[in-house]
Amino acid sequence: MPEPMGFYTDTTVCIGCKACEVACKEWNQLPSTNGGLNTLSGNSYDNTRRLDGIHWRHVKFIEQFPEDRRDGRWLLMSDVCKHCVQAGCLEVCPTGAIIRTEFDTVVIQSDACNGCRDCIAACPFGVIEMNPVAGTAQKCTLCYDRLQGGLEPACSKACPTQSIQFGTINQLRDRAQKRVAQLHQSGETRAYLYGADEKILGGLNSFYLLVDKPEVYGLPSDPKMPTRNLKPGAWFSVLGGMLVGLLGVISFRNRGSGEPRP
Amino acid sequence: MFAAMHAGRVKGMLCIGQNPATSLNAKLEREALRKLDWLVVKDNWIHETANFWKSAPEVTKGEVKAQDIKTEVFFFPVSQVAEDEGTYTNTQRLLQFHFKAAEAPGDCRSDTWFVYQLGKRLKKLYADSTLPRDEGWKNLVFDYEHEGENERKKGDPSNPKILKEINGFATDDPGRHMPGFAALKDDGSTTCASWIYCGVYPAPDKNLAARRTADPPGTPGAQLGWGWAWPSNRRVMYNRASADPDGKPWSERKKWVWWDEEQKKWTGYDVPDYPATKAPTDKAKPGAAGMDALPGTAPFIMRPDGLGWLFVPSGLVDGPLPTHYEPAESPVKNPLYEQQTSPVMKYWKDDANPLAEVGDPKFPYVMTTYRLTEHYLAGAMSRWNPWLTELQPELFIELSPELAGEKKIANLDWVTISSPRGKIRAKALVTRRLRPFTIDGKVVHQVGMPWHWGYEGLSRGDIVNELTALVGDPNVSIHEGKTFVCNVEKA
Ligand code: SF4
């Protein structure tokens, strides 16, 4: 069994080129918003707006310029599925379509997904959405097919600044800690790692180096598993489970009729 | 060229991989295109230049009628890079060979096919001429028939044969390729199309541009086994300057080439850009020519005194020292001199190329134009690609919240932008990345626009170059489209 693999994203060196977004779409043959006829979002240089079923990488542009323009900065962050060690999506999937791979990554098997959308609600990071072409819930697979072929994921391969790094989690954590120390030493004391230890959902196999609060980047500071409130043995949970199963079967029959994203 | 075309002095144009209908003072350029007898556009897409007669704003607005345009336009669909084999030469002088990855669709042909076929046809036209001026055509050797039968049938030339001609070979033994420009002779015994590339193809089975040997990770080096750089596979020019006058590296970290005292020669990671055995202690020989006239401490071997110049008394039109002039258009007087703009700047005088007066209240703002990572130049390689157009879908103008407030413009509002040359529309992107300047006690607002858009393609928008002027720098005519004056109003 290979060691756990994942991404370390150092947001301080991202230049916002979006090569990762395009490389992801090209490798995974994902469609474009409205066939490419998109509209300007008005939010800095971000026009794809969010992670969803056809955007498995998304670069965020956060402008922090005070009125007097002093100490202004443009935070850039390439967002992706966190491949959580305790993954909410995997926990709620009624059909077992979501699996943990031999690389300790979380993958939705499209052919077993019935499009019930439970995982969409269960993900604390808002990563998953329906892919309107496939009619199934989709997200980053950490290029499972490339990994099986001994290649690194398309995004990290394309990233010109090594903002996105791929490797074994141990090696990446080690590298990331050294980078934080280096940044602290050179005066950037706001640098810290998000998800590089067990505190967040048992560890994120895609973790980040950030220089502001998680919320600034649209990340929850303390994400929870969907089952956190369930009392074992409670009747309603059993009933609920059965209901989910039933709904699952029904949705399976409706699969493919998912309406396209507006 | 377009100024001459606009004045009616150019008859025809081969437009290969360019899109001038969206270029500087775009309306003037399209007016110039209308004065051509013929225009050949060779591109991947029917872009703005190919369709200037049909979908340009002046035609769709009815100011110009398509039937009144006499220019005959020919469109040649062309293959993309991955559909041909050949070499890339980048601005770092590195030649990298690439293979063909896919067949081009339909009737698309390569650039080399086009030029080869054109050359062969022109040669045929001149074959019976008796005019002395056509001797060149008649004696031109233009024989690059492809080795493969299929390609030959299609009319494709052989790229290795072309590369061989560029590299050079022995005239009476064409199988013997030239190993480098030092082997070239001026007695006719060698043939070489371009000395700088001599050595890239030193033997029939050795195309050095195709090499892919990288230096081992973590070791210093110049990647000499990766591709080939002109001239002589040298990666950094004037690299003797990486060593101090004594020939020692300036620092361990920046070590590149140095003088090896024991072997009495220059060595290093890179190919030294210096006579191999010219010692740092060498004195200049009075009255000598070439390198003998330079001391062993002078690294800039193409300069008459071998030195880099800060004070440049000759060679520059606007030397000897840099100074500040305002651009051709400016909202302020030059705070440094009486002289407002460079006295030697290039300006193409034409009724269609007017400039605003200094501080013209009709155009109070400074405009700068730039590019986005998502699009490439005039957009023919990016605005037809849905993966790119979804990332940057629409033309926009960036302005500060201060100016937006003054003009009552909200984020994403449509805005009209005008200059003495034209008027366009774009959506507002209000951002603090732009800021008002205080110049000479006066608040000056700056706005910025990316310029990739046009009236064809998947993502369309107005052409920002409708606003720019034909103004160039005095040395190499680099245009001044990066700064001019404009007005901005809510549309
Ligand atoms: S490719 Fe790398 S540098 Fe470019 S946007 Fe993505 S993470 Fe940032």
Image (cartoon, rainbow, N blue to C red):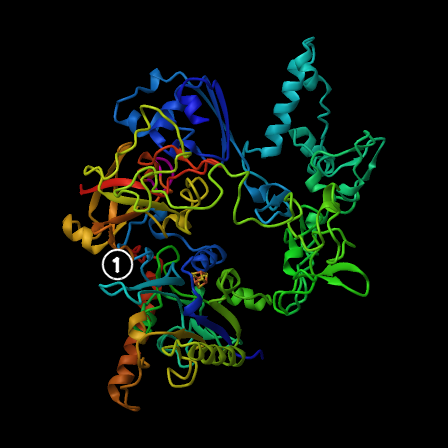
Tell me which secondary structure the magenta stretch mostly adopts: loop
Q: Residue A154's x, y, as percent?
A: 51, 61
Closer to us: B440 or A33: B440
Apparent side of residue B363 relative to residue B344 in the rendered image (left or right): left
Q: Chain of mark 1?
A: B
Q: Residue A121's x, y, as percent?
A: 29, 72
Q: Is residue B23 magenta?
A: no
Tell me: residue A11, above or below residue B375: below
Tell me: residue B127, above or below residue A32: above
Apparent side of residue A7 relative to residue A42 in the rendered image (left or right): right
Disc 1 marks which residue?
B432
The quarter of the displayed image where residue B159 is located: top right
> Which residue occupies 20% across, 50% down?
B442
> Which residue occupies 23% across, 39% down?
B359
Q: Is mark 1 within 8 Å of ligand 1?
A: no
Apparent side of residue B93 relative to residue B318 in the rendered image (left or right): right
Q: Residue B71's x, y, as percent?
A: 42, 18
Looking at the image, the residue that sits furthest to the front is B286
Classify the position of ligand 1 by quadrant: top left, top right, bottom left or bottom right: bottom left
- Mark yes or no: residue B200 visible: no
* Residue type beneath disc 1: Arg
> Which residue occupies 38% across, 60% down?
A55
Region of the chain picked out in magenta, as a range: B454-460
Q: Is label 1 in a helix, a strand or a loop?
A: loop
Q: Is residue B456 magenta?
A: yes
Label 1 crowding class (10 Å Cα cut-off): few <14, some 14-19, many 20+? Answer: many
Closer to us: A64 or B244: B244
Tell me: residue A3, above or below residue B277: below
Looking at the image, the residue that sits furthest to the top is B130
The quarter of the displayed image where residue A242 is located: bottom left
- Mark yes or no: residue B41 visible: yes
